[in-house]
Image (tube, rainbow, N blue to C red):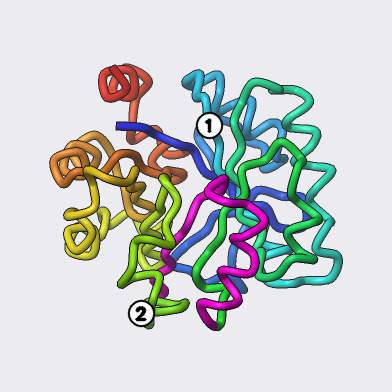
Amino acid sequence: MQIIPVIDLLDGVVVHAKKGDRKNYQPIQSLLTPSSKPLEIVTALLEYYPFQQLYIADLNAIQKLGDVKKNIPVIETILQHYPNIKLWIDAGISNGDELSIWHRRNFNAILGSENFSNLENFLEVKKYLNSDFVLSLDFMPNGYQGPLELLDNTQFWPKDVIIMSLAHVGANHGANIELLEKFRQHANTFNLYAAGGVRGIDDLTALEQAGIHGALIASALHKKQLSPDEIKRLLQ
């Protein structure tokens, strides 16, 4: 089981993502640090456990709020301080121009299904990346968002695929096991990652038993519901 901490950036501040209600996200309140500054949050997470990867959701870029490049200096500062950490970046990329802003910055781009109105739009961006990206299949509170072909045909998938359940993100109600079970048949071919709802070791154990390769986690870390010893045991 792989554990990837998540930080959600809005206007240069780390916010608490909850149930996909992006308009009402507030600065994070963490037991790891009193700060909501990105670098201090990352430092606190890595002091809690020496994670090798970090997922960053750039909410300015995802929501197309003003300058979509606003958080790039923040992200680059994180990488300067921690050059060995592998960053997965969700910046709401939906076309070649947006991809050019982020591509070749030593970030691993996430292509979220919610950003594509049709398969052709997705394939146009994918051709620039070959298989060097992470696909996020995005399930909002009102259901799946994106081209249906991405659900039905795995030939368009890269090796790493996130099953994103926004209704469960930050809710502390447990992972969406029912949704994840629908993808279990692909667990031997792809690295499937669960995003949303993980509360602690029991949820992660259930995910592992369901064939899930890894989990994206924020709240359980900031609330210390998952201890460093538990993380170590899971990663062994």
Relative image position of residue 177 (x, y in whole percent) = 19, 57
Q: Does residue 149 appear left or right of residue 29 in this picture?
A: left
Q: Residues within 10 Å of mark 2 (few under 14, many from 20)?
A: few
Residue that carries the numbered disc 1 in the rendered image: 53
The N terminus, quarter of image: top left
Q: Is residue 127 above or below residue 151?
A: above
Is residue 125 among what the camera can see? yes
Identify the magenta region: 118-141
Q: Secondary structure at mark 2?
A: strand
Q: Tell which of 1 and 126 is nearer to you.
A: 126
Percent position (x, y) of residue 97? 80, 66
Local packing at callout 1 (Cα closer than 10 Å; few below 14, some 14-19, many 20+) is: some
Report the quarter where the C terminus lies. top left
Q: Residue at x 50, y 24 (%)?
A: 51
Which residue is more in the foreground, 91 or 175? 91
Whether residue 130 appears in magenta in the rendering, the answer is: yes
**Residue 188 location in percent, x, y?**
22, 43
Q: Is residue 56 left or right of residue 179?
A: right
Q: Residue at x 53, y 64 (%)?
A: 112
**Amino acid tagged 1:** Gln
The residue singled out by tag 2 in the image is 143
Say what amino acid the circle numbered 2 marks.
Gly
Distance in Å between CA atoms under marks 2 and 1:
28 Å
Checking the image for residue 104, the label placed there is none
116 falls in the magenta region: no
Answer with left or right where residue 40 lies relative to residue 168: right
- The residue depicted at 36 percent of the width and 79 percent of the height is 143
Find numbered disc 1 in the image and state the secondary structure of the residue it sits on: strand
Q: Residue at x 77, y 71 (%)?
A: 65
Q: In the rendered image, which quarter is residue 191 located in?
A: top left
